[in-house]
Image (tube, rainbow, N blue to C red):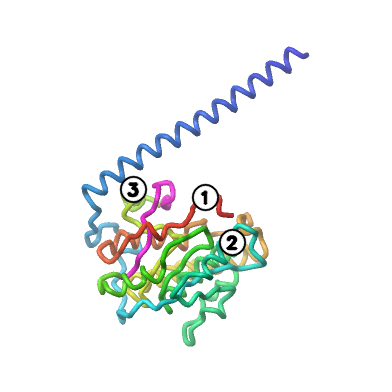
Amino acid sequence: MRMMDGLRQAKHQAFLVSKKLRRTGAAAALRDADRRGARREEKHPFTYTEGMFPHTFLCRPDPEGVQQEEVPAVLWVIWLGGPPPPRRARSLQALREQAGVDVRVVAGPEDVLVEGQPFHAAYGDLHVVHRSDYLRAYALHHHGGAYLDVKPQTAPVRELIDTMNDDPDAWVMGYREVTSAYVPDLPHSLGAHLRAHYRAVLGTSAFICRPRSQFTTEWMRELHARLDFLQEPLREADASGCDPYGAPAGYPIRWTEILGDITQPLSLKHQSHLRFSDRLRPQLEDYR
């Protein structure tokens, strides 16, 4: 019996070692592929052409009534729910201390709502993470300014806002995505281009935006189109009160579906109006 137990234990240990090696090998392969992709992007930057991604929202007609406005000296920070845990509390306090900007901590719709611009009817049925995604889109479109996740961050926000305002062709500024593993897994050529050109798209944890630019107008338009489609399934799923990092079994929205799945394809389309600064990139690991 002891021999059988020993064999089982040895077999299990071998399985764990094999699993670790597979993970390590996959991570190394991803790093190598990303390095090659970054070098390729540097030598041959991505160029968007009209109709490049047929049957996607990128092919919709350009919105009308787009305005060109100054970026206000405002920093939007979103924290929904109860008191933040210690690491998040320290990050939040550091963001509150950003110099030269009006720091607005958003705890709910009333903190960003603009008269005559109601929230989508499905907002109340969203998971808390997707409520945050909606709030940042709404604030950056209707108000403009900077948005930063509640993560360790030392970017000089006012300085970067001033840089945006000195550049009339700049609609949005952010950091370059750090790995192809963080881009959405979208079908067909759009997904393939996002993975291959991950360094040409914006990360999702920090933005500086002109209010009501074409970028944010298309962002909000597609966000509302998706919520129109998902409104009834969202109501049935009832994600209210669930764990911030979990969702009910019937919840119909993927993790990145109403943020990165929209902003990163738009990054490809409006490449010439993006400005990148990796100073905006927060700490993306061990921040909770």
User: Can you say whether 3 is above or below 280 in the image?
Assistant: above
Magenta stretch, residue numbers: 171-185
- Mark 3 or mark 1, whichever is nearer to me: 1
Could you tell me which residue is drawn at 35 percent across and 42 percent down? 34
What's the distance in space between the residues labelled 3 and 2, CA to CA? 38 Å
Q: Tag on residue 23?
A: none
Q: Which of the marked residues, 2 or 1, is nearer the chain's N terminus?
A: 2
Q: Residues within 10 Å of mark 3 (few under 14, many from 20)?
A: few
Residue 149 on image: x %, y % = 50, 63
Q: Report helix, strand or loop for mark 3.
A: helix
Which SS does the magenta portion mostly show?
loop
Q: Are marks 3 and 2 in contact (CB under 8 Å)?
A: no
Secondary structure under tag 1 reads loop
Read off the residue under disc 1. Answer: 285
- The residue that disc 2 covers is 90
Q: Residue under circle 3?
A: 192
Q: x, y (%) of residue 77? A: 52, 69
Q: Is residue 238 visible?
A: no
N-term-proximal mark, 3 vs 2: 2
